[in-house]
Amino acid sequence: MNELPTILTALNSDSAKTRERAIKDLAPTVLSEPQIIDALQKIVSADPVEYVRQAARARLLESGQTPAASVAPIQVKQEGAGKPAIFAFGVVGAALVICICVALAVIAALAMFNS
């Protein structure tokens, strides 16, 4: 099967999303390949990302295999986990700038009316 190396490369990708997509896109005929089953068993037992382990577990069950026990520690930081914090700082910063501008506008308006 000439697509097997490509699939195995995707299953071993550094990107959790790529691994998950590769697992979900596995054709039923490929699920019977021993190399694919071994790769899925490794993912179920050792992948640091829970949703990737769950996808692999589901595909193994679909193929009639018993998934291995998971021994991987749960990864605290997953892909994109820092983005909400950056977004929050951006929102707080923008709100602070708006408050300062409004305060300056009020002070300027009061100064104009008092003179």
Image (cartoon, grey):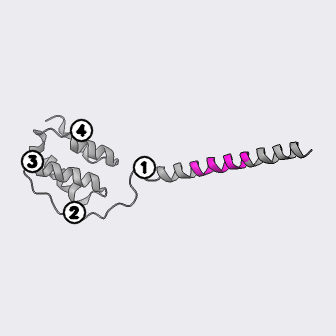
Query: What's the mark number on residue 92?
Result: none
Q: Distance between the residues labelled 2 and 3?
A: 18 Å
Left/right of residue 85 with respect to residue 3 in the rendered view:
right
> Residue 71's spot in the image, x, y percent?
24, 65
**First reached walking from the N terminus: tag 3 or tag 1:** 3
Instruction: Find out whether the residues at labels 2 and 3 contact each other: C-beta distance under 8 Å.
Output: no
Name the residue beneath numbered marker 4: 6
**First reached walking from the N terminus: tag 2 or tag 1:** 2
Label 4's element?
Answer: helix
Q: Distance between the residues labelled 4 and 1?
A: 25 Å
Mark whose residue sits in front, 4 or 1: 1
The quadrant holding residue 75 is bottom left
| Kind of residue indicated by mark 3 | Ser
Label 1's element?
Answer: loop
> Residue 115's spot in the image, x, y percent?
92, 44
Name the residue beneath numbered marker 1: 80
Q: Distance between the residues labelled 2 and 1?
A: 24 Å
> Residue 54's spot in the image, x, y percent?
23, 54
Instruction: Find out whether the residues at labels 2 and 1 contact each other: C-beta distance under 8 Å.
Output: no
User: Is residue 101 or residue 112 the one in the foreground?
Assistant: 112
User: Is residue 2 or residue 104 the one in the foreground?
Assistant: 104
Q: How far apart are marks 3 and 1 (CA)?
A: 31 Å
Mark whose residue sits in front, 2 or 4: 2
The quadrant holding residue 7 is top left
Q: Give the range drawn in magenta.
A: 91-102
Q: How crowded is mark 4: few (under 14 residues within 10 Å), some or many (20 or more)?
A: few
Left/right of residue 107 with respect to residue 91 in the rendered view:
right
Residue drawn at x 59%, y 52% is: 92
Query: What's the mark number on residue 70?
Result: 2
Mark whose residue sits in front, 3 or 4: 3
Left/right of residue 23 with respect to residue 84 in the rendered view:
left
